[in-house]
Image (cartoon, grey):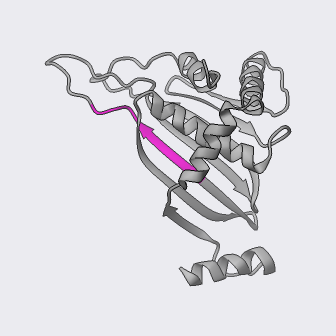
Amino acid sequence: MSSFLDDLLKKVFRGSEQTPINHKENFTFKEEELAESKSWIASDTGRETLELIYRNFHLKRTQIANRPEVHLFQSPYANGFAVSYDEPFTKGSFSALFLAFSERVLDLGYRQVSLDRKLEEVNQQVKATEKFYFKPPLQKTAENELISQLYGNISLEKITIDNQPSYIKFLATVYSDRLFQDALPFDQLIDHLFKSADG
């Protein structure tokens, strides 16, 4: 691990021409970080930020971009969005939003399959990706009964470049297997994700 850190520091501070950084590890958030996220999302600032992103999400569907900018991903098998790091975010509130989204996915009954961090060198910059991956709950079904996939599999990523926040990406990918029921509407998932903390 120390040689990895040495290489990373050389890349960041000296622009070394050595082998590009590429490291992946599992990790967990501390209880204090989770508590801070819950506190922020329940605050006036947290609620206002959620409302702003939710509004910008719907504006983007009509080709209107607003700050912080929201980018949409739409296809028959995957739907999602990314929100850029911009005003009114701080590093702390951006991380709090990332954790708040993860908690809201778990509230739907999803199970967290993984949480990992990947560090890689891209265009002589260090890109860090923190990623949650969620699957619908395991369930036993009656004979000939289709399995509920809820909204499909969900991935949630927070990207930083050279230690500066860049964007959060949320993506739901549906199962096309005939063993599964159709996925629930993506708009319903969005409404749950952005509901007010007391709603």
The image position of residue 138, as x and y in percent, is 28, 33
Q: Which residues are magenta?
A: 130-138
Labels in figure, total: 0
The image position of residue 77, as x and y in percent, is 49, 27
In-image side of 166 versus 23 (left or right): right
Residue 118: quarter of image = bottom right
**Residue plotted at (76% across, 30% down):** 49
Q: Nearer the viewer, residue 112 or 183?
A: 112
The image position of residue 141, as x and y in percent, is 20, 22
**Residue plotted at (55% across, 68% down):** 23
Residue 169 position (above or below residue 127)? above
> Is residue 133 part of the magenta span, yes or no?
yes
Residue 183 position (above or below residue 163)? above
> Is residue 164 part of the magenta span, yes or no?
no
In the rendered image, the residue lying farthest to the left is 143
Type of secondary structure dominating the magenta stretch: strand
**Residue plotted at (34% across, 32% down):** 137
Residue 72 position (above or below residue 7)? above
Residue 168: quarter of image = top right
Q: Nearer the viewer, residue 17 or 13?
A: 13
In-image side of 30 versus 127 (left or right): left
Quarter of the image that includes the C terminus: top right
The image position of residue 74, as x and y in percent, is 61, 25
**Residue plotted at (68% across, 60% down):** 127
Residue 63: quarter of image = top right
